[in-house]
Image: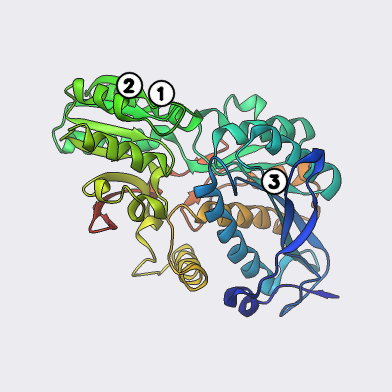
Amino acid sequence: MANGISRRRALTGGLGLAAGTTLGGGLAGCSRIFGGSQDGGAVNTSGELVVGVNLELTGVGSTLGKLQEQALIIAASELNINGIPFGDRRLAVRAIVRDNGGNPENAAQISQDFIDNDKVSAILGGTTVETAMAMIAVSEKRKVPLLCLNSGEEITFPLPARKFTYKLGPNAADVGAMIARELVRQQISTVAVLASADGHGSAGANAVPRSLAAAGLQHVGTVRLPQSGRAFTDAAKQVVASKAKAAVVWALAPISAAAVAALRDAGFLGKIFVDAGAGADETLSGPNAAAMEGTYIIHPAVLGGAPTLATTPSGRAARDFIYRYIQQYGAFSGFAPYAADALNLVAFAARRGVNLEPQRLRGRLEAGAVEGITGAYAFQPISHGGLEPDALVLFTAKGGNWVRLL
């Protein structure tokens, strides 16, 4: 009988990253393997649940991709303390992480390699819509569950073409609706949208105007940020010229903070809201931190840190994860738990059955609501994402911290 990872070893920085083979298809980089039945640990395990993790550790999306890798180390170590109950035995989790560099072609090739060579039961990843869409094309064709870590609208639609695809990020419509409710409460009636030029921005550019209309608010225009991600001055000036009393910035970190700074520099004096994609450390600690003061964000409650009162199993799990994350990395990021939730969802699906074959695992992912660190996920045959809306709350940036308001 082989052993799993010990929690103590993982949390003191001793969790090994085993260098694997060069990525397939001529891609540069190495695999990093977390866990597995040969790593040594506190409990005997028999067999492995092998999961491929396809992340943006460099290039576009790396600000968020690195957070996901850190969360995976913690989640894998926790699962491997006792292993995953599986019939009359227990499984160790082996997570194989590869860097797609924010490149969709690389992401597709890595997913293909996971399926052909590593024989994974599921794939996690895609913090950007663009890499996720490339991964979806592979996973759907090969019938392997894919748990995406972003909030793109097209990730789980149309559902007949997304039978094996699940989304963990909050739905844009839910975030937009909450922003609209807060604007009504503050009696702000004219709103502009400043959205990034990528798939994440498109989700907001589509969802926010619908939410504003449903709330009886006036949408005075949508401006898309340039592809370069740098020269935001002209876009910001267009928002100022619209005379909007509030602006919604919809972009992933660190672009979101740069866009807010551009609005401030252009003389925008109204209220500014950002979506959950801005919930990374760099937003309030990077070069544009001062501009973020007073900005609102709609984000899962976990952005506020460990719950003061953890009276439920999910609350205690969130508290323990945040404490471990701080111990390991020094500070907690609210965006981090998605990857941990994804790995735990796959493990939960495996625990429900006696077969790790990907198509069987897919069916067990759709067995109803499961509480995660970030909130509840209720995957069903008619709905593959994302996070349940009651997990979302309102924060404001104050003194370099996110302060919960609702």
Q: Residue at x 42, y 55 (%)?
A: 334
Q: Where is residue 207 in the image (x, y as percent from the top left)?
A: 39, 27
Q: In which quarter of the image is residue 241?
A: top left
Secondary structure at badge 3 equals strand
The crowding category of the residue bearing disc 2, from other C-alpha atoms within 10 Å (few below 14, some 14 to 19, many at least 20), is many
The colour scheme used to paint the residues is: rainbow
Q: Which mark is residue 123?
A: 3
Q: Which amino acid does label 1 sit on?
A: Asn
Q: Is residue 42 visible?
A: yes
Q: Mark 2 points at which residue?
A: 222
The residue at the point 30 percent across, 33 percent down is 248
Say how many tags the image has. 3
Indicate which disc, 2 or 3, sits on the residue closer to the N terminus: 3
| Residue plotted at (27% across, 55% down) | 404
Which three-letter amino acid code belongs to the residue tagged 2?
Answer: Thr
Contact between labelled residues 3 and 2, with CB atoms less than 8 Å apart: no
Q: What residue type is labelled 3?
A: Ile
Q: What quarter of the picture does the N terminus occupy?
A: bottom right
Q: Name the residue under label 1.
A: 206
Query: Residue 229 falls in which quadrant of the image?
Result: top left
State the residue lying farthest toward the front: 231
Judged from the image, the secondary structure of the residue bearing numbered disc 1 is helix
